[in-house]
Image: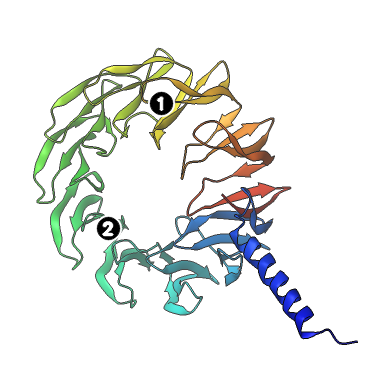
Amino acid sequence: MSSSPLRLLQLLACAFFALALQAQTPAQPGNVIVPCIYEDAYGFQNGMALVKHNGKWGYVDKTGREVIPCKYQIYFPCEGITEDLACLCDDGWFGFLTKTGAPAIPFEFDEAWPFAEGLAVVKKDEKRGFIDKTGHVVVLLRYDLVFSFTEGLAAVKLDKKWGFVDKTGRELIPLKYDDADSFHEGLAAVQLNKLWGFIDKTGREVIPCKYELYESFAEGMAGVLVNDRLGFIDKTGREIVAPRYVYDYPSGRYSEGLAVVKLNGNWGFIDMQGREVIPLNYSGAYDFHDGLASVKQNGKWGFIDKTGQVVIPLRYNRVSTFSEGLAGMQVEKKWGFIDKTGREVIAPTYDDILSFDGGIAAVKLNGKWGFIGK
């Protein structure tokens, strides 16, 4: 017997109401976006994530659709899409695909690195240079080593000496250094006679080469080593923090106005004037992110704020830094996520995790990787 028009309208109204309720109900934290079916995975970058299946690599989008099939090889550092192009290796040759998987630059290079500032490092016949997004060589493949462009310049090496080129390939800073690093905050570290200093973009030696080791400038300060002790200088080379600390990861860089430092086996934090604003009372510590830093005492990790106040108790086996308001925490070999109040947002269920990026995090379960939402 057929339904009456009124009955059909009622059914349609119920269905519409149910769909409306469903649309208004937010996804539960930890909602599976991509099932744990991959052998390896990296976090999302530009809306795509690199994944490994049957020994080959490809990309999935945020719906879990395999946009670029898992049929490519990949080698560090080509583990992400930058500037809308994916650097991959096919049958031993490197090239680039678009985010849709369409060919962009032919697979014809011995090596290639992701695009940075519109140019990518490529290698042929043991020489390196740069191509643009059309595949055109803009910096001749003549160098033994090169770094990707930062702040408009790239460090290059030829015949055991380093200098810098601009995006036309012009050697703007002569190749005369024993070693060099990329530009950060307008200055680049260079080495002469086994000692490090800093130059500006004209090649002027702003800070003499007199340090045993260095960290790049961050927040206007750089960590430097003198007599195997860590201190900090500003961009004029003025010593702000005397070299007295032990150089050990992750010390040597400022983050959110504070730097983690180590002395006599204990960790704490100094401010931009070098004052020990958070006492060196911890057996482990990491940089501040999102206003909180992880610290360790008695074998357990938690989080403090910039006043040194413990805001999340030190009760976890391991933790990750905060990203997008959430941090990973490990309890009895399983990982989950907490918010900045210490509330357990995603229960410790996973064997491994990566930080949230764009609302999605890679997680590992039973030996396979997938992705969850916040």
**Residue extending furthest toward the bottom:** 2
**Residue extending furthest toward the front:** 6
* Mark earlier in primary sequence (2, 1): 2
Local crowd size for mark 1, using a 10 Å CA cut-off: few (<14), some (14–19), many (≥20): some
Residue drawn at the location 13% of the way across and 54% of the way down: 174
The answer to whether any part of residue 158 appears in the image is no
Relative image position of residue 274 (x, y in whole percent) = 24, 20
Label of residue 149 in the image:
2
Callout 2 amino acid? Phe
Question: Which quarter shows the N terminus?
Answer: bottom right
| SS type, badge 2 | loop
**Residue extending furthest toward the right:** 1
Asked if 312 appears above or below 87 in the picture, the reply is above
Label of residue 305 in the image:
1
Local crowd size for mark 2, using a 10 Å CA cut-off: few (<14), some (14–19), many (≥20): many
Callout 1 amino acid? Asp
Q: Is 123 on the left-hand or right-hand side of 370?
A: left
Residue drawn at the location 64% of the way across and 61% of the way down: 21
Asked if 67 appears above or below 77 in the picture, the reply is below
Relative image position of residue 148 (x, y in whole percent) = 31, 57
Q: Is 25 on the left-hand or right-hand side of 276?
A: right
Relative image position of residue 203 (x, y in whole percent) = 11, 49
Q: CA distance from mark 2 to mark 1?
A: 35 Å
Q: Quadrant of residue 137?
A: bottom left
Q: Is 13 on the left-hand or right-hand side of 82?
A: right
Relative image position of residue 268 (x, y in whole percent) = 38, 19
